[in-house]
Image: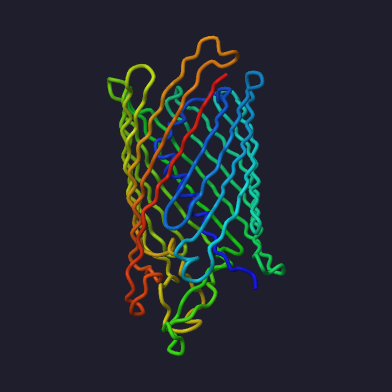
Amino acid sequence: MAVTRLKGSRRLQIGLLVTLTLLAPFLVAAVLPKDRLDALYHAYNGGGVEVDGPSILWRKQFGQYTSVNANYYIDAISSASIDAVTSASPYKEERREKSIGGDFLLNTAIMSLGYTVSEENDFDAKTASVSLSQDVFGDLTTVSMGYVRGWDQIGKNGDPQFSEKANRQRYRIGVSQILTRNMIAALNFETVSDEGFLNNPYRSVRYLDSGSASGYSYEPEVYPKTHTSNALSLRARYYLPYRASLLGEYRYFTDSWGVRANNIAFGYSHPHGQNWIFDVRYRYYTQDDADFYSDLFPNRQAQNFLARDKELSRFNNHTLGLSVSYEITPKDWFFIDRGSINLSYDHIFFRYKNFRDLSIGGVVDQEPLYAFDADVLQIYLSLWY
């Protein structure tokens, strides 16, 4: 009998990306990226899920108008999440991602192209992207737009006949504006359109069943074949006289499945001497549940669409983060001009409002609500040459 597994890594990767880029700098000038080599180690640990691995990013400029990049990224995933504990089996797997891209300077505009391939033993994804940013009004304003197209191939371990596809499209437009000598703001809008097999082939929902010893039974979840979402965000950074800066961000999300989400974040960056930079940050996220989500359905096949994914439930989280960066100013380091060593740590508190922890047990539909904490660590070395 094949071991049934659950795959929750994709949403965790999205959450990890948002957390780690919370204080990313604004891009406001039509300048090609500098020649650079980054070596990264990342780790996530929370809710019975561990994700860690290295990443290598290389950038190289050719002439005055072209810069190319290549990235190799590995996720080693070990999961004994609440889903796996209650309705499936823990699992281990590895995800490998390879990407190439290029940036092209066109007067006061930059066009970027990229292609990414991600491989797991039962999930393959290919993504192509194109974006364009243009400086206007004396380089005080930058207008940007982008398009991403993805093709997913979904399999299922233990079932060689199972094969599904999903197509994904993402459109983005944004405006970055220098407001004053010390302040810059950016407004971005993004819409995402997904079509195909959009749920997890391993995950199940539960429903009341008087004939079961536990009082409930399981059946496979069923999602709509289409999903559209929209997100609007506003970010602002204010530079203080002593080289420090303040950051604020608000983001609103809505989708065709009934999910509504709000995200607010604050950050402070403080330099110390000529080489040290310290960052502290806070982020609060809250969302409603999807229209077809339920922790416990009244009966089998209670409705057309069924979901018990905790990421579609009603929940919130708080994130506290700290980053430390040290700039290296080498002398006679062969071809190395400068470098930096960076350490970033975030602690996240997840609290679910209508997803119950079945691992603890209790009266049906009165089990304790699920909650967990997670740690996110990132260590990376950057070298400019």
Of residues 36 and 152, the one drawn nearer to the viewer in this rendering? 36
Name the residue at 42% across, 25% down. Answer: 140
Q: Is residue 373 left or right of residue 55?
A: left
Task: Locate the C terminus by quadrant.
Answer: top right
Q: Is residue 124 above or below residue 67?
A: below
Quarter of the view holding residue 98: top right
Residue reaching furthest to the left: 241
Q: Is residue 65 above or below residue 91?
A: above
Query: Could you tell me which residue is drawn at 36 percent across and 30 percent down?
Result: 184
Q: Position of residue 15 (x, y in %)?
A: 45, 49
Is 318 placed left or right of 200 in the picture?
left
In screen coordinates, is 152 left or right of 146?
A: right
Figure label count: 0
> Closer to the camera, 374 or 167?
374
Q: Which x, y percent locates residue 55?
A: 57, 38
Residue at far right of view: 161
The outermost residue toward the top is: 332
Residue 44 place in picture, x, y as percent: 46, 48
Q: How is the image coloured?
A: rainbow
